[in-house]
Image (tube, grey):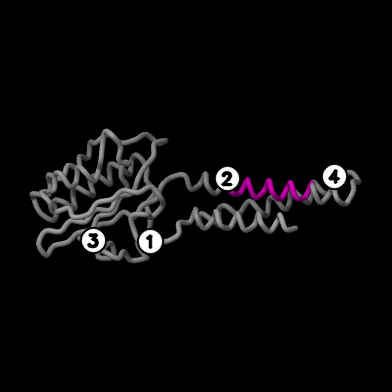
Amino acid sequence: RRLSNCFITLPLFSVQCRLCRSQLVPISHSSLLSLAAMWVQAAVLAVFALCFHQGDALKCHQCNSLTDPKCGDPIDSSVGLTECTPDFMKDASQMFKSAADSISGALGKLGFDANIEVPDANAAFACVKAVRQDGDKKGVIRACSIPSNSKFDMCAKLKAESGGVVTFCETCTSDGCNGASGVSPNSLLALLVVAVTALLVRL
């Protein structure tokens, strides 16, 4: 959906080019080619900027293997991504707490407080993946998080207060990084823009 939103601007650009061409005064062939090249390059940059603006909000997998087996390792490719927002962070912290309580009453001390201070709309987010192993019971939780910093470390807090049952925890800051490995949509878009630019240079 993000890519289709990005390239919907191209037909409009084409119309603009036709209008501009009808208003041009006679100029040399080389000047016309240079002008056209500049317009095309400007359009590519505009689309590039639009796509990345639309992709500013980090998207993470948001699931719990205790209630959705597809969330386990490896994660099922059908598990979608959720956009991280300040309001969503409160829901995410509740999800962590609910998941912990559903496993064992003792895991209610994991420290996920629904009233935890969350970043404002312009703050950065991170994705988190945590694995807990208590005997033969294993749970995988993936969600949006606050990136680790000097004041708060999500994974350190989890491990310290879980009684040793959290065997893995990691935060990351790219779309879908707390799920299956792969190239993110932004990476694919960047490769596409580079390819188009290289083609224009050859022309």
Q: Is residue 74 above or below residue 4?
A: below
| CA separation in Å, label 1 and label 4 | 51 Å
Q: Going by the image, does 180 lie left or right of 168?
A: right
Badge 1 amino acid: Ser
Which numbered mark, 1 or 2, is in the foreground of this view?
Answer: 1
Badge 3 amino acid: Ser
Q: Earlier in the sequence, mark 2 or mark 3?
A: 2
| CA separation in Å, label 2 and label 3 | 37 Å
**Residue 119: x, y in percent?**
34, 35
Q: Which residue is labeled 2 in the image?
A: 49
| CA separation in Å, label 1 and label 3 | 18 Å
Q: Going by the image, does 100 lie left or right of 38?
A: left
Residue at point 28%, 56% (across, down) = 63
**Element marked by disc 1:** loop
Badge 4 amino acid: Gln
**Residue 75 position by quadrant:** bottom left
> Which one is nearer the viewer's eye here, 73 or 64?
73
Neighbours of disc 4 within 10 Å: few (<14), some (14-19), many (20+) = few
Q: Does the magenta portion include 200?
A: no
Which numbered mark, 1 or 3, is in the foreground of this view?
Answer: 1
